[in-house]
Amino acid sequence: MTQMCKELHRPQFHFSPEEKWMNDPNGMVFFNDEYHLFYQYHPFGTTWGPMHWGHAVSKDMIQWEHLPIALYPDELGAIFSGSAVVDWNNTTGFFEKDKPGLVAIYTSAGTYPDSDRPLQQQSLAYSKDNGRTWVKYEGNPVLSDVNITDYRDPKVFWHEETNKWVMVLATGQTITIYTSLNLKEWEFASEFGHTAGSHDGVWECPDLFKLPVDDGQEKWVMIVSIGDNGQSAEGSRTQYFIGEFDGSTFVNDHDDSTILWLDYGRDNYAGVSWSDIQDGRRIYLGWMSNWRYANQVPTETWRSAMTLPRELSLSSTENGIRLFQKPVEEVRTIRKEMKKYGVESGTIPLASSLMEITIELEKETSKQFGIVLKHSEEERTVIGYDAVEEKIFVDRTKSGDNRFSTSFPAIQEAPLKLNRQRLKLQVFLDTSSIEVFANDGEIAITSLIFPSEDAKELSIFSNEGTTKVLDVTLTQLDSIWE
């Protein structure tokens, strides 16, 4: 553990595998006081390969215990993405009476006999010992469709109103919804998305859940990740839809041309939410990378990390109801020394690269303002606001090593109107990433960075006019490896 802690670019408070390749979060479920995180894992290399399910557990989603591989490839193929649920009522018959257990629903990724054509089917595995060991269902696969090649990433949940299991499945450029009484036998319910939202790439990793709105109503949120088509500047990214769901059909509240982005940074993909959290929160986790360069990022013994876990909520804005996100309250467990500053300008030294930065700035006459995080004489990351264009941006063009991909140097932008002329930022800086939450989570920008040195100082800038500094608070964060 100590040696891993010291590796160049090793995240210090974000989840990363001890070694080798990781991508999508899978099977996220809360059971017997543990948060389970499974993930796409290649144990034999640091680039994408035959997929297994890696496994870790946590009491707080911050400190993680790494466990042995949960699911291995079999005669049906590799173990692609999926979900896990608690079968509280033993609908499957896998468990003893009054003893609920975990059921994983995943994609078996193989090929058709005597063919190179991919064959993706949905399969089950179950665990009677809190996820430590798994038995694959002898009746696998439980769901197939010979007409669809991209047929994967099942997210399953129990729908109380209809007393059925619901599966949302990525099916090429749409999401197909199925229902079941026992997780073994599935019926087609509906299909969503032929013309809705962005179709810049293959649709992947769906999620569907209900959230309260601040005005007292409830809405359903569908999350859909979009693969990299090689043409768009952003690469792979994630959109969401807001609407109604009756147990079989999702109806989008917006017209088909409306595109709502979950995150405006380059490095938040394939994220889904935890199942069976009992305190009412809807908590999301994403893979902190991008298919445009995920196999090339400059790490050596491991590749990839996850975002911070985020609590999702719906709030009314002048543009309508939107998805807000904020880091889970459990981040308090790694907070250390906190300092407040009352500077109008100038430079603030940083004690480490593990920082939570909260800052509130008020536009007076400036056209552009924000903060600069200086890593070295040549390396810096800029978080700024363009008051003319009404956009927040994260500029990583000079943040460190970017030689591995021409797509990596980027200025990542998001539309954002100031709130009473004020910009409020909550920033989490790790050794190789920065997560920016603007105006209480209305906008999120997640970005990898690969500086050669720890961050040294923070400075506030104001271009073509003045900006008032209302608050600057810096909090050191602890490493989860020590």
Image (tube, rainbow, N blue to C red):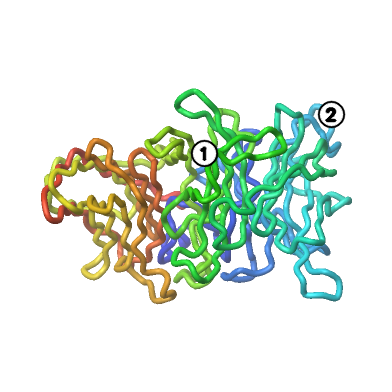
Across the whole image, how many numbered discs are drawn on residues? 2
Q: Name the residue tied to disc 1.
A: 60
Amino acid on which disc 1 is placed: Asp
Counting other residues with Cα less than 10 Å from the Cα at mark 1, is it few (<14), some (14-19), or many (20 or more)? some
Amino acid on which disc 2 is placed: Lys
Is the Cβ of the residue at disc 2 closer than 8 Å to that at disc 1? no
Q: Nearer the viewer, residue 208 or 174?
A: 174
* Label 1 element class: loop
Q: Nearer the viewer, residue 469 or 175?
A: 175
Q: Determine whether 140 is above or below 4 in the image.
A: above
Q: What x and y, as percent, mark residue 280?
A: 56, 29
* Label 2 element class: loop
Residue under the image location 30 percent in, 52 percent down:
391
Counting other residues with Cα less than 10 Å from the Cα at mark 2, is it few (<14), some (14-19), or many (20 or more)? few
Quadrant assignment, res 368: bottom left
Quadrant assignment, res 379: bottom left
Q: Is residue 445 left or right of residue 302?
A: left
Is residue 168 at least partly visible in the picture?
yes
Furthest residue in direction right, as rendered: 139
Q: What x and y, as percent, mark residue 131?
A: 70, 44
Q: Is residue 91 left or right of residue 292?
A: right
Q: What x and y, as percent, mark residue 17?
A: 55, 58
State which tag comes first along the sequence, 2 or 1: 1
Residue under the image location 88 percent in, 50 percent down:
139
Q: What x and y, as percent, mark residue 389?
A: 27, 53
Residue under the image location 21 percent in, 68 percent down:
377
Mark number displayed over residue 97: 2
Q: Determine whether 58 is above or below 267 in the image.
A: above
Is residue 482 at least partly visible in the picture?
no
Residue under the image location 38 percent in, 47 percent down:
478
